[in-house]
Image: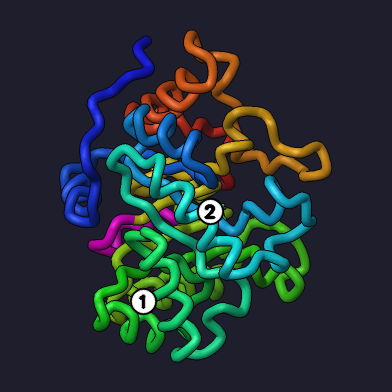
Amino acid sequence: MSSQTAVKRTNLTTLTKMKERGEKFASLTAYDACFAEMISGAGVEVLLVGDSLGMVLQGHDSTLPVTLDNIVYHMECVRRGNQGAFIMADLPFMSYAHERQALESSAALMRAGAHMVKLEGGAWLTSTTTQLAERGIPVCAHMGLTPQSINRLGGYRVQGRDPAKAQAMIDEAKMLEEAGASILLLECVPVDLAGAITEALTIPVIGIGAGREVDGQIMVMHDMLGITPPSIKLPKFVKNFLPESSDGVRGAFVAYREAVKTGAFPADEHCFF
Ligand code: KIV
């Protein structure tokens, strides 16, 4: 297995066409230039400068302490290493509490090199999403388990099992698409619900713990290399790809990308039914 794949530039049009063709795409978090180069060089189409850096880099027990300046710093590092992937950056906790703040925070991330910003939430974000999209800032809406709301959710658990909550998630996802969101990310959602949402939307849907019926997969880089700090409890949707690599860390990124493309990942053991 070769770890060097020709680097192709990925943008929103590329990802939307992949959805239309039924071709899966792979995404991973990245926080620095070195890993951004390796991951994008392995052909992974989307990088996320995620606020998970608060847990895997900074050692916090949640994403809440992460600041906008933290994400800007790591965004600039990732931009320097990137070999053509599409880069999303997280708007961290309380950096988009109202529309003006969302515009200013997003501008800082786009100036640092982001191609898209990601916000956690549902219907309450429709107006913010429209404001951003109208000003040229592509939006990824993050629904399902939203870690910035961990204190309100009461734990890291599957969302949308209750039929009424599942229907609300479908409705809110459609509202966000109509409001101008260009990608939806679903975290910790049962397979059937994620499939129904993916079918209902024309924009690409990326899943983490959301089964195989979505258009793309994402994982935290540390989780798929088996180097997550021991203080963090690993969710069932995580798979370590390092053991099946014939080329160290680079090979693990290639193996992950291939497994996503062929549908070998996620397997049933990584899904919620
Ligand atoms: O911050 C992050 O890494 C994320 C992923 C869990 C999708 O939002």
Q: Is residue 209 visible?
A: yes
Local packing at callout 2 (Cα closer than 10 Å; few below 14, some 14-19, many 20+) is some
Q: Looking at the picture, does residue 240 appear above or below residue 134? A: above
Residue at the (17%, 55%) spot, across then down: 13
What residue would you read off at disc 2? 74
Residue 15, percent from left and from top: 24, 50
Secondary structure beneath disc 2?
helix
The CA span between labels 1 and 2 is 27 Å
Q: Quadrant of ligand 1?
A: bottom right
Q: Is residue 197 visible?
A: no
Amino acid type at image mark 1 = Leu
Q: Residue furthest right?
A: 231
Residue 170, x across and y down, in percent:
41, 70
Left or right of 80: which side holds 71?
A: right
**Left or right for 101, reference 79:** right
Q: Quadrant of residue 160?
A: bottom right
Magenta part of the protein: which range?
194-204
